[in-house]
Image (spheres, rainbow, N blue to C red):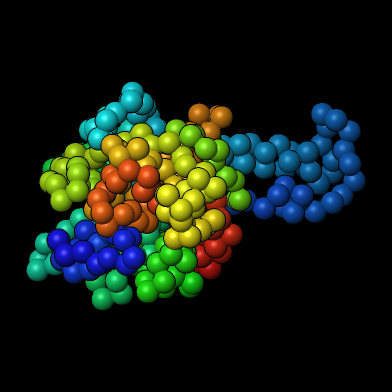
Amino acid sequence: MEKKIFDHICHWALRKSPPCALPVSPWPISRLIKPGPRPRPGFQDSHGHTMIRVLLLSALVAGALSCGLPTYLPNLSRVVGGDDVRPNSWPWQVSLQYSSNGQWRHTCGGSLVAKDWVLTAAHCISSSRTYRVVLGRHSLSTDESGSLAVKVSKLVVHEDWDSNKLSQGNDIALLKLASPVALTDKIQLGCLPPAGSILPNNYACYVTGWGRLQTGGALPDILQQGRLLVVDYATCSSPSWWGSTVKTNMVCAGGDGVISSCNGDSGGPLNCQNANGQWEVHGVVSFGSSLGCNYYHKPSVFTRVSGYIDWINSVMANN
């Protein structure tokens, strides 16, 4: 695979040509309900306002719990250099594939964040290619029961993404599916994190993907996972780490010289578990060091999803 290097930065998409390297949030309840006479507790007024409030609260709670809770729980034991995942334990993980000479080729990962939307990296997208998304898959080479392949009908790349100014960030894109998918035990939604949320230093997360097992190494057939510790901005932006290349709209994780994302992982999720046990997609795999996938003090760099919640919601609402 040919690699395009920008100041020792390398994107982790797989292509024959360079580069290398939630559903819309509900309005607050107060915006959904017109003000009216306040009913007595436990009773319903003439317009049924109490019942409406109960139904809306129930719907919002159900919606909040409908993502990030896999049927098949992931194996969270410490891994060195990545490991095969438990089948379908990251059910929002997708394989983004493009058509080439009559065949579909894996190029990047992605996350199903609504029934008809996939979150991925901007650098994965070329307007000249035809894409599909494969969902519910454990082995890429096997047409597994319960998996789906769905064409992409629309590509929305962040308007401030510039492939010639990689370190500015905004490496994020949304893919609209040609038809909504049915959620199953193998295909589920990943949660989006709260807007503006910042993970603390050393917070344990998992990167997942079908990327190379090591620098220049083989591509796995089975989905891989790797445990990465978040590196806070103050550390990651220090001169002995990534320096000024890293911005606040990014998340760093790893840098131990052992575990990292690699070519083919681009666009995939950095999965971090919240206090309620739900998995949130806090990062989108963006780039790593051209010196190697797991170079010491050059952690994997992700687009910080919590910085783009308004953009994500706007795109999905208007497309």
Please state the horizontal and vertical placement of residue 247, each as a whole percent of the image: 51, 58
Residue 300 in the image: above or below residue 81 = below
In the rendered image, the residue lying farthest to the left is 101
Residue 240 % position (x, y): 42, 49
Residue 99 appears in the picture as rendered: no
Residue nearest the viewer, comparing 284 with 44? 284
> What residue do we see at 37% from left, 45% from top?
297
Residue 308 lies left or right of residue 296; in this view the side is right
Residue 101 in view here? yes
Of residues 263 and 54, the one nearer the viewer is 263
The residue at 33%/25% (across/down) is 78
Please provide percent x and percent y for residue 26: 62, 51
Question: Foreground: 22 or 231?
Answer: 231
Position of residue 303 relative to residue 191, above or below, is: below
Q: Quadrant of residue 227?
A: top left
Left or right? Give the position of 228 relative to 250. Answer: left
Camera-side residue: 83 or 95?
A: 83
Left or right? Give the position of 142 relative to 82: left
- Which residue is drawn at the image coordinates 12% and 46% (left, top)? 218
Where residue 305 sits: x, y (%)?
50, 52
